[in-house]
Image (spheres, rainbow, N blue to C red):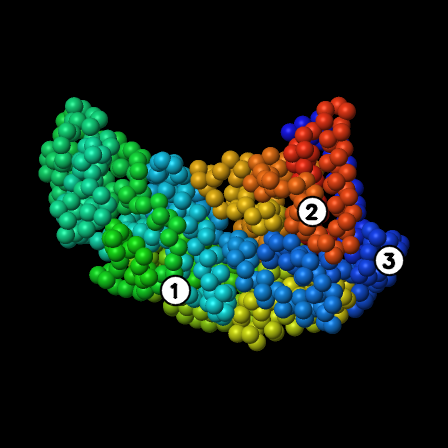
């Protein structure tokens, strides 16, 4: 691609600069000294307003109000990644009440599949489910990190990576389903119906089975000798029975596993035929699970399902006779990591709990019976993976992050008068220390968590902690209880900060900053509350409000919305949905499952900021301004997309049709947008120049690919609010 070579960037960047200037002037932000209304660049619909930098609260103290082209593009792009259509724009221009018409459109937009994907990504971050890695995966099991197996032909990522991705998506998918059904949104704190895969169900049942206690010891409670009194190992893969038989108690091959390392046993102990391991007792000279405990047996079976063959050895023989561990093909199926369905998590006694190895019955099951309490996002593996715990911290971080997610609030450090907690950690924060203001209410509240889960997020079996009394005291709401996490979740669900907290999370998503509080913000919170916390109503009322659109002055507000960069998820949603290329940046696709295009885009976009969160920080991290590194990486991403996706989208199209699609679909400028024709002219001139370049003319395809990069870098694609 001659026109995309680094040495020629200066030539086609001229097109970027011209396009950016044209769009920035025309985005509706023209000040009193801007182009005339009749100027074809400025166009109809722009609205000037006086700006007084010394203005007082109550004045409309902004540079300019946004025109319909700008604010409608912003709203539809944020919610769906799709461009504003010609019909959309015409309908809004002709509407007697554009704000009401936009609200109606929003109701339709948020029902689209594209909006579900955008909403899911928002929820993954908002519920802080994205911090899992190999260390956290094994930490939840009270083990040191190791690898697991992977599928072959085609090869996939390790199963722990696939499960971590499941954990990250699980509750976001759950929240999307709650929104689609119009359920009260505070059910995200209390629901026991979770979108899960079979692989997740296996993991959760295993963790419910082998409880990791506060001191890292293990308690096995829902499986035992009667489940698998013996297991059989075979030394070569051809002897291995299918999983359907391995996990069928009525099969002769029940609990018969292939072990890759048996043939290479050390100390002259190579095995040529099947061996039987008694899980109930150990006899000198006989084979056993190397760990030597029932935890080891359960772990052996579970890890075989995950594709890891744990070591075995002969009991008390000389010389030492043992195998190593090996990572091989999992006994789970690849579909077990993608068969998303709603599962009800039912409270059960140990005797009635689901068996983690009962794969035949777990697949497709709509119920998972667990002993451990389950309550909304608070007990999800994605959240636990993100916020590991230990005895020194003793659930303080866990509790604080739960508050931040649920209410958008944290402890302010101000001591509460007339409240002296009996369960305060005086050594950590005595009444005379600067930390007392936080710990006075934090320490009594964190006991809701400590009463339910251990430091490794296993079920709390310690009687001295299981019955702990905790005190919820936060922003005027106070309650003493012994109901653990479930009671804590119920209190959060009823807290008055819940509704405004989630409106502000949506504000950060829309504007990269909090919405100013005042009458308009209160109106939106009231509409959300009055709708029985239907988040669709919150989205409709906020995204059609001047707080997001910047279309009109807002009472008691001294600043309007600002144009920002499209952060990674938003930019990638724009490209994916406008080009029709699923997950073009590979955000939700693991590396070994990704195409060359996705891996190239992922690498290029790595330095483009995305919405994120930090420990103890209430405000989400939403970087709004660009810079040289961000711009350079976005340019690389657009070039990768031009080189790898162009043929997928535009193959066989006439050059004029390609240019029209670049402007209409990729840049989001429909034919009735006054900027459309100017953008067509710029891209057409660029293609012509590229093909006639005396230093090295580009082919027609190369010239159109170069035009693609310009359109990809334009404010309507790479920005928000232009």
Could you tell me which secondary element the residue under label 2 belongs to? helix
Q: Please say if 447 is above or below 632.
A: below
Look at the numbered discs 1 and 3 and tell me whether their residues touch, using CB distance below 8 Å.
no
Quadrant hosting residue 286: top left
- Percent across and percent down for residue 65 are 78, 61
Pick the front one: 450 or 117: 117
Instruction: Please report the residue visible at 46 percent of the width from the left and 42 percent of the height from the top.
Output: 590
Q: Disc 2 or 1, which lies upstream in sequence? A: 1
Q: Residue tagged by mark 2?
A: 660
Q: Can the viewer see residue 500? A: no
Q: Residue tagged by mark 1?
A: 192
Q: Disc 1 or 3, which lies upstream in sequence? A: 3
- Distance from the alpha carbon under mark 2 to that under mark 1: 49 Å
Quadrant hosting residue 710: top right
Instruction: Please report the residue visible at 77 percent of the width from the left and 43 percent of the height from the top.
Output: 681
Instruction: Please report the residue visible at 65 percent of the width from the left and 54 percent of the height from the top.
Output: 83
Q: Is residue 560 toward the left or the right of residue 404 in the image?
A: right
- Percent across and percent down for residue 616 are 55, 53
Disc nearest the viewer among 2 and 1: 2
- Percent across and percent down for residue 401 are 50, 56
Could you tell me which secondary element the residue under label 1 belongs to? loop
Q: Dot 1, how many residues are within 10 Å of its Cα: few (below 14), some (14-19), or many (20+)?
A: many
Q: Residue tagged by mark 3?
A: 37
Q: Is residue 412 toward the left or the right of residue 89 in the image?
A: left
């Amino acid at each position: 691609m001659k026109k995309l070579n680094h040495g020629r960037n200066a030539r086609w960047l001229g097109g970027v600069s011209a396009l950016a200037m044209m769009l920035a002037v025309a985005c509706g932000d023209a000040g009193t000294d801007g182009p005339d209304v009749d100027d074809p660049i400025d166009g109809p619909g722009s609205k000037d307003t006086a700006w007084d930098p010394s203005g007082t609260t109550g004045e409309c103290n902004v540079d300019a109000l946004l025109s319909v082209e700008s604010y409608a593009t912003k709203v539809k792009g944020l919610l769906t990644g799709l461009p504003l259509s010609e019909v959309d724009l015409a309908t809004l221009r002709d509407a007697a009440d554009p704000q009401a018409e936009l609200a109606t459109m929003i109701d339709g937009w948020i029902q689209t599949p594209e909006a579900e994907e955008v909403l899911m990504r928002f929820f993954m971050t908002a519920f802080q489910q994205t911090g899992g890695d190999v260390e956290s995966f094994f930490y939840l099991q009270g083990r040191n990190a190791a690898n697991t197996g992977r599928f072959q032909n085609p090869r996939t990522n390790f199963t722990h990576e696939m499960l971590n991705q499941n954990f990250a998506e699980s509750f976001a998918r759950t929240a999307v389903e709650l929104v689609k059904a119009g359920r009260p949104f505070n059910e995200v704190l209390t629901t026991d119906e979770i979108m899960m895969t079979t692989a997740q169900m296996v993991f959760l049942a295993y963790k419910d089975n082998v409880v990791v206690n506060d001191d890292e010891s293990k308690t096995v409670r829902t499986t035992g000798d009667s489940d698998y009194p013996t297991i059989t190992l075979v030394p070569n893969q051809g002897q291995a029975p299918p999983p359907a038989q391995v996990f069928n108690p009525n099969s002769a091959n029940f609990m018969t596993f292939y072990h890759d390392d048996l043939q290479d046993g050390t100390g002259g102990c190579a095995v040529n035929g099947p061996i039987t391991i008694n899980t109930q007792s150990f006899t000198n000279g006989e084979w056993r699970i190397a760990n030597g405990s029932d935890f080891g047996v359960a772990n052996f079976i579970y890890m075989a399902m995950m594709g890891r063959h744990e070591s075995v050895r002969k009991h008390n023989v000389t010389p030492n006779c043992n195998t190593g561990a090996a990572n091989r093909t999992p006994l789970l199926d690849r579909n077990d990591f993608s068969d998303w369905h709603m599962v009800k998590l039912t409270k059960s006694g140990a005797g009635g709990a689901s068996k983690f190895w009962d794969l035949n019955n777990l697949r497709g099951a709509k119920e998972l019976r667990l002993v451990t309490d389950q309550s909304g996002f608070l007990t999800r593996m994605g959240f636990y993976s993100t916020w590991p715990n230990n005895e020194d911290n003793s659930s303080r971080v866990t509790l604080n992050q739960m508050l931040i997610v649920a209410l958008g609030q944290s402890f302010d450090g101000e001591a509460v008068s007339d409240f002296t907690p009996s369960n305060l950690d005086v050594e950590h924060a005595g009444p005379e220390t600067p930390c007392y203001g936080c710990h006075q209410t934090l320490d009594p509240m964190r006991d809701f968590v400590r009463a339910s889960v251990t430091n490794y997020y296993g079920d709390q079996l310690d009687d001295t902690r299981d019955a702990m009394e905790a005190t919820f005291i936060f922003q005027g709401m106070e309650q003493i209880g012994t109901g653990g996490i479930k009671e804590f979740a119920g209190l959060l669900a009823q807290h008055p900060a819940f509704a405004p907290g989630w409106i502000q999370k949506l504000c950060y998503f829309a504007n990269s900053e909090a919405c100013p509080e005042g009458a308009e913000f209160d109106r939106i919170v009231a509409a959300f509350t009055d709708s029985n916390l239907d988040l669709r109503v919150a989205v409709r009322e906020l995204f059609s409000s001047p707080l997001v659109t910047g279309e009109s002055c807002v009472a008691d507000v001294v600043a309007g919305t600002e144009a920002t960069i499209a952060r990674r998820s938003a930019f990638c949603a724009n490209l994916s949905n406008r080009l029709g290329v699923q997950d073009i940046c590979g955000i939700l696709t693991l590396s070994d499952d990704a195409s060359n295009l996705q891996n190239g885009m992922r690498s290029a976009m790595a330095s483009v900021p995305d919405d994120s969160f930090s420990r103890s920080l209430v405000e989400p991290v939403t970087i709004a301004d660009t810079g040289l590194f961000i711009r350079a990486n976005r340019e690389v991403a657009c070039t990768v997309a031009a080189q790898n996706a162009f043929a997928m989208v535009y193959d066989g199209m006439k050059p004029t049709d390609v240019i029209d699609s670049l402007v209409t679909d990729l840049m989001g400028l429909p034919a009735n947008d006054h900027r459309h024709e100017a953008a067509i002219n710029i891209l057409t001139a660029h293609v012509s120049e590229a093909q006639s370049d005396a230093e090295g003319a580009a082919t027609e395809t190369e010239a159109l690919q170069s035009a693609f990069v310009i359109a990809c870098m334009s404010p309507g694609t790479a920005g928000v609010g232009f």
